[in-house]
Structures are given as structure tokens and as C-alpha cells.
Image (cartoon, rainbow, N blue to C red):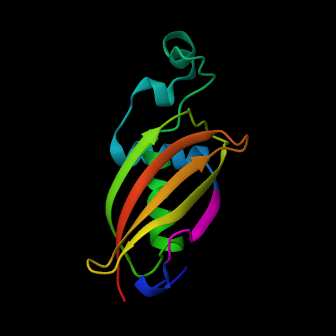
Amino acid sequence: MNKYTLYDLKPGLTESFKVTVTQGIQDNFRDMTGDVNPMHIDPEYVKKFGGGGYTDCLVYGMCTASFYSTLVGVYLPGEKCLFHECDVAWTAPVYVGDELTVTGKVAEVDERFKRIKIKAYIENQRGERVSRATLITGVRE
């Protein structure tokens, strides 16, 4: 776990990590949220009604976005973070078995309010961007 302080953080500082989305992650997210939409749990439904050329059940978008919490809470800034805002867009589907690379880059440091803005994105193993986000975090000194 990183322990960046506000004064360690400069625009351009970048951190990333990899995670493979497992069926267990998908199942745990479904169990936690109660979201039983068939696009996430029924492959035949997805193929018949999903449109968009989807090949299998889609990983929950909010499950994918939850890795932004890991990014700020563990990597950038890490231990001294308090997550304030997340503006996220999903740009391509994620499937169980995908290996995702989550990357964040400090865009702004606001010393007055002890906050940083991070531009972040998630790419799959084929280099396709599946999500992008602007993240705002408070940072303790």
C-alpha cells in the first residue's frame, strides 16, 4: 500500500495495477447488490437479447468501477486517501476472465483544500479501454 502525502503528489504521477475478473468476483458482486439482471447472469439471454455483439454475460459496470476505489485507496494516493468523487463512463464490455489494468494519473493538486484530481482508465488484456473516470480524493498530510 502506498502512503503518498499531499506534498508527494505532483501532476503526472502515475500508478497502475492488474486484476483478473473471476466468476467469484462476479458472483460476490451479484450477491452483495442483489442485481439479477439477466445480462449479467444468463448467457443465453445475452446472446438472444443483448445486442451489441456481446458474447457472454457482462461483468457489472459498477463492479468494474469498484477497482477505482482500489486505485485510490491502495495505490494513488493510498493509505492517506479519502475518496470524494467518481465520474465514470463505460466504453466497452468486460467479461469474466478479462485481465484489467487500472491506471490513474494525477491531473491536479489543490493544496488549499487538500484534494487531488486523478484521470483514470481501465484497459482489458487486448489494450481496449473499457472505462474512464475522473476521481477526486482528499489526502491527509
- Please identify the quadrant where the N terminus is shown: bottom right
Q: Position of residue 43 (x, y in %)?
A: 57, 22
Q: Position of residue 108 (x, y in %)?
A: 42, 68
Spot the residue most to the top: 48
Judge left or right: residue 15 versus residue 82. Answer: right
Q: Out of 51 and 21, give the one closest to the viewer.
A: 51
Does residue 19 sit above or below 5 in this rendering? above
x 48%, y 57%: residue: 119
- Please identify the quadrant where the C terminus is shown: bottom left
x 41%, y 83%: residue: 6
Spot the residue most to the right: 126
Spot the residue most to the left: 113
Does residue 57 sit above or below 44 in this rendering? below
Q: Which residues are magenta?
A: 10-18
* Number of marks drawn: 0
Spot the residue most to the bottom: 141
Q: Out of 94 and 121, give the one closest to the viewer.
A: 121
Q: Position of residue 79 (x, y in %)?
A: 45, 80
x 54%, y 10%: residue: 48
**Is residue 16 found inside the magenta-colored segment of the image?**
yes
Does residue 87 sit above or below 2 in this rendering? above
Does residue 48 sit above or below 4 in this rendering? above
Judge left or right: residue 41 versus residue 103. Answer: left
Q: Out of 22 and 73, give the one closest to the viewer.
A: 73
x 63%, y 63%: residue: 17
**Is residue 11 found inside the magenta-colored segment of the image?**
yes
